[in-house]
Amino acid sequence: MTLKGKKCAMLVEEGFEDLELWYPVIRLREEGAEVVLVGTGSATTYRGKYGLSATADVTAGEVSASDFAAVLVPGGWAPDKLRRYPEVLDLVAAAYKEGKVIAAICHAPWVLISAKILPGHTVTCVSAIKDDVENAGAKYVDAEVVKSGNIITSRTPADLPAFCREIIAALREQ
């Protein structure tokens, strides 16, 4: 229980990649962290790409970056929806500015692009959005996990073990 006392936000919206949401939530809870599911408010319960559901505890407008040690963004199609909500972008940008861990996997860097926090960072993502992260001012590398400042990124569900190890290590250092 090395993360006891750490509170993490996992963003959630319709179409999240099931494993990319639930695997980090379970791993962080196993380490003793409190994980809060933060939705957009478009629904209470959201359905993943493969049918798992996730019920939001709160909406992005009801919390602030200072409430959390980390903000995690799952992939799937949810990031394209998440980035349309100013409250989500404000939460991510404020957490970044406060030096909190920002973790994004697969298509999730879309949210980081819209929050305007990628310039100057080295990141990875699913190859389909490589051009998007580069056009946002980040350097793309093809690696299972990349830590650049307080931003941690991974490519796909196959990278989840490395992604979670890096998040847990960063939270231990806080």
Image (spheres, rainbow, N blue to C red):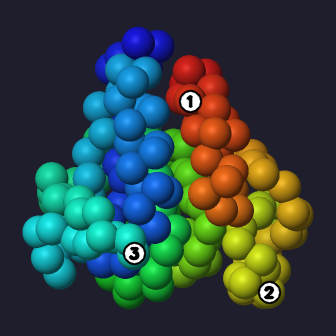
Tag 2 or tag 1, which sits nearer the N-term? 2
Q: Residue 49 carries which label?
A: 3
Label 2 amino acid?
Answer: Asp
Find residue 125 and report its image quarter. Answer: bottom right
- Residue type marked 1: Ile
Badge 1 marks a residue whose secondary structure is: helix
Residue drawn at the location 15% of the way across and 53% of the way down: 57
Which residue is identified by label 2?
131
Neighbor class of circle 2 (other Cα within 10 Å; few <14, some 14-19, many 20+) is few
Image x and y of residue 72, in percent: 46, 53
Give the amino acid type for the residue marked by disc 3 in the picture. Lys
Q: What residue lies at 30% left-to-right and 77% top-to-bottom?
A: 14
Compared with 167, 47 (above or below) is: below
Which label sits in the foreground, 1 or 3? 3
Q: If you read the primary sequence from the N terminus, does the residue marked by circle 1 or circle 3 appear first?
A: 3
Q: Residue at x 78, y 51 (%)?
A: 144
- Looking at the image, tell me whether mark 2 or mark 3 is earlier in sequence order: 3
Q: Distance from label 1 to label 2 (Cα)?
A: 29 Å
Q: Mark 1 points at which residue?
A: 168
The residue nearer to you, when weighing 153 against 95, is 153
Query: How far is disc 2 from disc 3 in space, using C-alphas?
Result: 24 Å
The image shows residue 64 at horizontal and vertical percentages of 28, 53
Residue 128 shown left or right of residue 103 in the figure: right
Residue 50 lies, in percent from the top left, at 38, 71
